[in-house]
Amino acid sequence: QLLDRATLDWISHCVHSYKTYNKEVMSIMIRNTGSTAFCPGVDIKSLYPDMDAFTSKWQPEARTYYRKVQELAWDLASIAYPPTVSVMNGFVGGPGLSFGLNCHYACGTSNTVIALTEPASGFVPYGGASFRYAKLPRKLGFYLALTGVPVSGIDTFFSELVSHFAPEHLYDDVIHSLEDSQYRGFSAVRMALCDGLMMDKLIPKEARRAFSFQPHLDAIERCFSHDDIESVLRALEEEKTAWSQETRELILKAAPTSIKVTFEMLKLAESMAFEECLQMENRALLNMMERADYETGLRTVLSKDAASGEGGEVGGATTTAAAAPMWSPPRIEDVSKSTVQQVLTQIHDQDDFRVGIVVEDIEGGELKVNTEPKLDYKWLQDGHVEPVHREKLSEEELFDMGLITDEMVEAVERYSQDPAVERREDPDVSAGDLGFGEQDGDDQADEDIVGLELPEDEATGNKEQ
């Protein structure tokens, strides 16, 4: 369904509560009933009940709504226990990307359709979408984000948007496996997914060759590897193929400011950690909400959906023919670099934020992990019933979660006993830099096995590694 404020509040509160207070929960699974839509987009009529009274300044309700989407993305993607699973059996767009793609295990079915269409609506990616799309192979994420082209069925697995793919009914077996499991933690969830989804089943070679984007991957990588969107458009024009011309037209139809900002966000996200992308998205969406294109996009979507008899949504489904929106400015070349930088960097008082789990310095040969989230920013506490008070995890729990492995302990011991090695003075080392969150397992699965599972570092959300 379209995501209204009440549903978002309920999902956000449930996930945050289970992750913070209930230590008996083995895992959190989010799935939709039916096979039409997982979450196609924002319910505009719930967010803006009176569009006639809309002003160019963003309203508090919308500001709170999108902040909660960002909070939910972090709650789901953080490596804190328990592990999260999403089963997207239908259309996924807008805020649906936040709690669909950011789970530790993002699962698809034959009904799954994923699309990022914010630039076409005068907005920017949010909910961690910039991070997920920027990490897709061969610049595929740039192509999908800038054109709004949907990815469906088995293509969601081949494009690496989902970590697992199987028929819908098999996910019921996953739930039964989790209920009967004698273990807890990521290993238990992995075993349930492997058993329930029949991971040893073979993918027919015909299905591999049927990857929809395979014929264009070389051209996508060639065209979208440039440093600015103007060069991308020139490269598409020089390709002189039907596909390249169609792609170019899709980009030119979208809001010029949104296109340039989205392209820059993806470029930056390629080398950013997840929490950095959330911060960048938060700044960008707040600044874009103050621009005229945001209102233009809302009214355009509402008018198209009214013509087709549907409810309003942003980042949602395909729209019917209507008058082309009047973007400001109207051309990509009219959007200055300073405008893009302003959208990405201007801070709105206490709406800026930082979250993360950090590794403290190594003392006396002991590896110290600070499992307390950084709650020094007010935004993270807003919308929750009470501030987070997380107990320190024991060494046994850290091992069970995969945060510490025997190899890490041995490395620390060697480090502490080697007098020739200079000690670190920098106390801030990111968890990703030390490989935290990665699980033990094979790095390379046999290409003929439907392992339907990404390498462990990607399945646990650390796609930057």
Image (tube, rainbow, N blue to C red):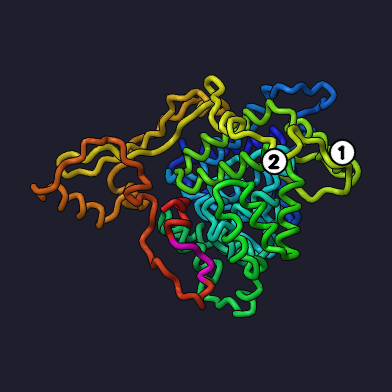
Residue 75 in the image: x percent, y percent?
Answer: 51, 40
Q: Nearer the viewer, residue 368 or 394?
A: 368
Give SS at disc 2.
helix
Mark closer to the chain start, 2 or 1: 1
Q: Residue at x 42, y 37 (%)?
A: 356
Q: Residue at x 41, y 34 (%)?
A: 373
Q: Residue at x 62, y 64 (%)?
A: 219
Residue 122 in the image: x percent, y percent?
Answer: 72, 37
Q: Nearer the viewer, residue 252 or 18?
A: 252
Q: CA distance from mark 2 to mark 1?
A: 24 Å
Q: Nearer the viewer, residue 190 or 180?
A: 190
- Can you identify the residue that label 1 sits on? 303
Q: Is residue 168 above or below residue 230?
A: below
Give SS at disc 1.
helix
Specify whether residue 344 is painted magenta.
no
Q: Is residue 196 above or below residue 390?
A: below
- For badge 2, the amino acid type reads Ile
Residue 98 in the image: x percent, y percent?
Answer: 60, 44
Q: Which span is picked out in magenta?
A: 451-455
